[in-house]
Image (cartoon, helix red, strand yellow):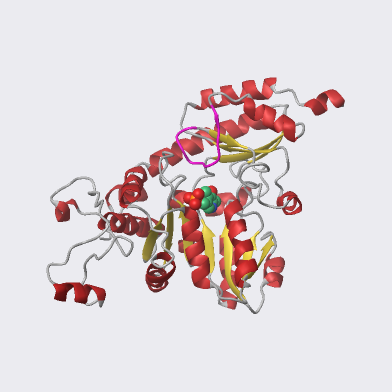
Amino acid sequence: MTREKRFETEVIHNGYDSLNYHGSLVPPLFQTSTFTFPTAEEGEKRFAGETEGYIYSRLGNPTVKVLEDKVAALEKAEAALAFGSGMAAVSAVLFYLTKSGDHILCSEGIYGCTFGLLQLMEKKHNIGHSLISFDKEESVRAAIRDNTACIYIETPINPTMKLVDLEMTVRIAKEYGIPVVVDNTFCSPYLQRPLELGCDYVLHSATKYIGGHGDVVAGLLAGRKEPLAEIAMTTLKDIGGIISPFDAWLLLRGLKTLPVRLDRHCDNAERVARLLKEHSQVKKVYFPGDPDFSQYQLAKKQMKRPGGMISFEVKGTKADAQKFLNHCHLIKIAVSLGDAETLIQHPATMTHSVVPEAERVKMGITDTLIRLSVGLEAWEDIWGDLKQALDTYQPTSLHQA
Ligand SMILES: *Cc1c(COP(=O)(O)O)cnc(C)c1O
């Protein structure tokens, strides 16, 4: 079902026609592992791909299909696939695109477990990678090798908030005929649509903004029909990182309010970032919506709004950063992001603790960097909690000075 309505309308209506489901306003939950065949001959035809119809939920499920169709429409993709986690989507696309001896070119500063996966691919399957800054066109060109099988980027990069210029990346990749994969988790399709700019695959940890309520772990991948059909029948079906129908149903529920929620996340983050910048215990704020942010113009060009994620440096040491976190009360200390609750975490010891220190520091993840996922509470209360924590944690280095 294709509609050419605005995003806010499509997110509610696209991909589902209630009249096909007894008029059920909400997509039904097909909580079943398998599907019965009316006859043995029909079973044979379904397995042979001669007739349409469901077989077994690892191969496809009607609730999951509604989600996939909706996400494809939102990303302006030909097709989409749902996975049991963001990492299942990352691994499915990377294993699909590479073979032993290949090389993956990545943006410097990627999700911690993606980094872990790349290490595993290198060690066990001889698939190498380089992590480079995508700041300069020359350095991207210089890093492309004969065996580069794909470019894998995040933008904004977790947790430094650095951006990768998607238009520039696509221009270079097209010259070399290399597919571009974008982890669009921090933006969701409401804020950024890499496929519209010519990227080949876009993926999400749907655990974050798309689910939006902190109650499901899931992943999504969108792109062209043919490769996605192949992924569905190989690295999704056979490795088996499928989503459960119930989790797909929860994502369908979460998706309806995605634009409303994200606008509020962005409004709150804009206010909080401004106030953080003015606080004497904050050394630096990294937020794409800050006019002083080094890539502010790029953010305006490729993102609808700056998003709900802020990173900032507090004064002091690693222990001081931890002390500051312990002084937050309304704001919860937790990894993950995009939930209604404002969440705060310490990347150096949490999400990015698997990254070796030298690599970590090169990425800009210092011991005093804090990542904040600004939630949906009243901004006055979010700021109130941050302010009292900043006012009271008392960095030791100040006393040493
Ligand atoms: C959380 C996250 C992932 C991994 O997703 P899971 O759903 O936790 O498997 C990948 N990329 C980014 C940017 C993330 O924030």
Q: Is residue 186 visible?
A: no
Residue 225 rendering spot, x and y as whole percentages:
37, 70
Horizontal side of residue 25 vs 380, given as left or right: left
Quarter holding the C terminus is top right
Q: Identify which residue, 243 or 144, lies in the foreground.
A: 243
Count the marks: how many?
0
Residue 118 rendering spot, x and y as whole percentages:
61, 62
Residue 391 rendering spot, x and y as whole percentages:
68, 21
* Above or below: residue 244 compared with residue 131: above
Residue 196 rendering spot, x and y as whole percentages:
45, 62
Q: Which residues are magenta?
A: 331-341
Q: Residue furthest right?
A: 401
Q: Is residue 149 visible?
A: yes
Is 240 in the magenta?
Answer: no
* Above or below: residue 184 compared with residue 349: below
Q: Identify which residue, 117 or 359, lies in the foreground.
A: 117
Residue located 58% across and 67% down the image:
151
Residue located 46% across and 32% down the image:
376
Residue located 74% across and 52% down the image:
362
Residue located 70% across and 23% down the image:
393
Q: Identify which residue, 74 or 127, lies in the foreground.
A: 127
* Above or below: residue 4 compared with residue 282: below
Which secondary structure is most common in the magenta stretch? loop
Horizontal side of residue 241 vs 34, given as left or right: right
